[in-house]
Amino acid sequence: MKLLILSIVVSSCSLANTACAQSAWKAQSIPVTTRWTAAVSPQNALPEYPRPQMVRPQWQNLNGLWDYAITAKDAAAPTTYKGKILVPYPLESALSGVKKSLTPEQKLWYSRTIKKPATETATRYLLHFGAVDWQATVYLNGKKIGDHEGGYQAFTIDITAHFKPGDNHLVVGVWDPSDQGNNPRGKQVLQPRGIMYTSTSGIWQTVWLEAVPEKYIDDLKITPAQNSVTVAVSTNNNEHLTTEVVALTGGTPVASAKGKAGEPLLLSIPNAHQWSPDDPFLYDLSIKLYQDGQLLDSVTSYTGIRTISIQKDEKGQERIFLNGIYTYNLGVLDQGFWPDGLYTAPTDEALRFDILAIKSMGFNTIRKHIKIEPARWYYHCDKLGMLVWQDMVTCANESPAARLIFEKENKENLALLHNYPSIVCWVLFNEGWAKFDQERLTEWMKTTDPSRIINGHSGENYDRRAVTNPNDRWKSSDLTDIHDYPGPGIAPAMPGKARVLGEWGGVQVRVLNHQWNGSEGWGYVSVPPAQFAEKYEFMMKHLKIYEEEGLSGSIYTEPFDVEIEENGLMTYDREIIKIPVEKIRAIHSRIIPATSALAADFKIRDMDTTNPDNRYAGLLETYRKGKKDSLFLKDLALMAVRLNDLTNAQLIATDYYKYMKPPFTRSEWIFIFNMTNSVKDKGFEFIRKYKDAANKNMGTRQADQKLMTIIYNDEISPEISSTKLYPDWNNMFTRTKQYGPAGEEIYMRAKTLYHYNNKEWDKFAPCVTQYIGKYAASLSPEELNRYAITVFYRYTDTSLLMTASGWSQLSLKQGERSSLLFTRANLLYKAGRKQEAITIQERALTLAPEADRKNYEAVLAKMKRNEATW
């Protein structure tokens, strides 16, 4: 077969015109960058071949500068575009050159020109997308040619029918509801906070073009066994076609098989060289497609020969066995976020670095946490030798629509990632988040892919709902899995299941000048830098005891800091390791021996383990002697807060405020928030005066919440906690009213909660009615539900019950949940609206988790028998 010759064409700016490309794009400013940020440009945006499991040598990379625009969600494709965006970096990232959020009311548009490649034999043209988050519609020359729903799965569109010689206009429209829709979206949110991070919208993996024959190979399914591998070759047209698969090592064939296209071919490999983390040996695969003896198409691939199973060790303990050998899975919880690219690593070298770093620290396992990575990430795991536990991307909510999408995407995920030998475990649910039909879905996974073990639910102890039968916690799963922060802990022993610790650790260690948002960072527990190595070694000694008792795997949270979550063994910018690498390798060698030498290309700096706060006294004296430059003042003020020297903190902050002029940047708002703890602090007036700007920078109602917290602590809490028999609410009202809307709201909230906590039901009802009547939009569904269910249990007045049912209805605006429907049904039933109540209770039952169904069924039965449910 003659090689295909493709002409490489770049839209908008030619490769020869470097100045044009550079002037149209620049990375946006962020608090910390990585060593690879500066290496990114429109000429080298992830240039590597994106699909290592099915390679053709001829292809055209469409990454680079595209035009972009943001319109209303329902708007037609724009005729003019706002500027340039660097594909494939997501809209919200610094590397996109845009760094803007996409709201659910908006649509993102991409546009560029592509030319039809010159080929000698190809007759079909395939447009490939690595991933687009979330709903993509593709147009060519003004005609819709395809669409795709799903933020993590690759998809391909045959564009042949609409691909003309010369210039072709390619447009991609994207809608992404982020955390406001039914879409699986992992840790992405519009308002980053805590364990949730900045959202990713639009194209975030490589876009590329292939020219192929009329009949071509379109997919491979590669399944290894102990001494063999089965390969099924799919084509776009299997009629009268045959395939040949050859396994090679060092260019020498070791096994081969021929058969009909679409049918599995078994390649037996005597004395197969098995793949493992200590010896990640891979066989090359050559796949060819024939018709009547004529070669039509060929691709190359690879595989690793390995098995994974649950077996008993010599003591009768169920363990994880790799290739028939007990292998402790010593792992980390890798979330796959980057400061510069968010979901997209800045370069392929950076993508590889993360895996190399984890392996260099002495781990052999990565739990990829509720994110699907680009194909090359799994390729690097295969090449470097890293076991992977792959999470499904969390179901968005408990609605039927979200559940259907979750199941659809799970099916696509298993097919997309099937061929990677490094993936040894599928993780279905995490910590009870929107969990449903666990047993059915776990069994489906086992049937769909018997070549891997299944973790049906990681972190069952975080699912607080009662379970009648403890065995139900891990129904059909191959593992019993708990989470324990900081831990460690050990899951219970159950027949046929290995015991693992699905998450643990979470020790925060701040590394100054390598933080995403300064002192806003958090962790499950916090230790000074100088104490971290000792703390970590102590925890690992306990982990070893649990391993000896039967623990088969553990997943430490986490390898890298992520935005404000500072639980990493390394900083978010991948610059500093918090325990010297040789030290942490030695600690881990007590669990699994460090059989391989430290990689020569692993470069990292050790953290200075001297606590910088120890220099505070000297720095304070320098300040008193007149040093007043802005950066010095900012760092010293934050240091004073950490050391609880609040008086000096305010003095230093006041000096720093002189350098600040509105409108304040997000960094300045973070400083103001962290330095403001009293109504007397200067920052309090900043927040009051510029509240709308603060909310825009810090997140919806964050300024309101900050003001209310301070007002409560200064004006309300002392009165409530005093020795008086009863709080003077009139005096409190006068004192809080002076602070405007925030003071009035916190007064009403405090009064409502006081009556609620003290069971003063005669005062609670009018108070909560007034509070919700005025501030319902500010209350979470959980808070509205708590007040509504309280009315159900405590009152019989029909008017009040109907008012509370209105609160319950408001709680459902953000999405249906069984617990919220349950409350509304009971309120309506008690108020005499029995048929309506039964209908809603039936709906609640369809959404109820397994643990709640018996109770829901019992309540429904009482409603139908006209019996009291309270």
Image (tube, rainbow, N blue to C red):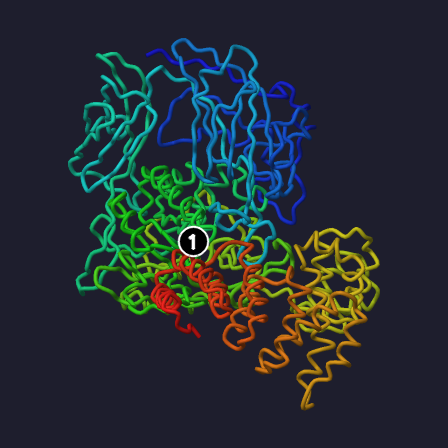
**Which sits in the foreground, 623 or 432?**
432
Compared with 710, 300 (above or below) is: above
Residue 773 appears at what percent x and percent y? 66, 65
Position of residue 24 in the picture relative to residue 827 (left or right): right
Q: Quadrant of the N terminus?
A: top left
Q: Which residue is mark 1?
A: 361
Which residue lies at the image location 57% right of the left edge and 28% below the top edge? 64
Compared with 161, 24 (above or below) is: below
Q: Residue 668's image quarter?
A: bottom right
Q: What is the tally of numbered marks visible in this picture? A: 1
Which residue lies at the image location 46% right of the left edge and 20% below the top edge? 159
**Which sits in the foreground, 364 or 440?**
440
Residue 221 appears at what percent x and percent y? 29, 33
Compared with 108, 721 (above or below) is: below
Residue 664 appears at what percent x and percent y? 77, 52
**Residue 583 appears in view:** no
Q: Amino acid under label 1?
A: Met
Q: Residue 744's image quarter?
A: bottom right
Residue extending furthest top?
120
Position of residue 748 in the picture relative to residue 569 (left or right): right
Q: Residue 502's image quarter?
A: bottom left
Crowd around label 1: few <14 · some 14–19 · many ≥20 (10 Å) = many
**Residue 324 appears in view:** yes
Q: Quadrant of the C terminus?
A: bottom left
Residue 644 appears at what percent x and percent y? 68, 73
Is label 1 in a helix, a strand or a loop? Answer: loop
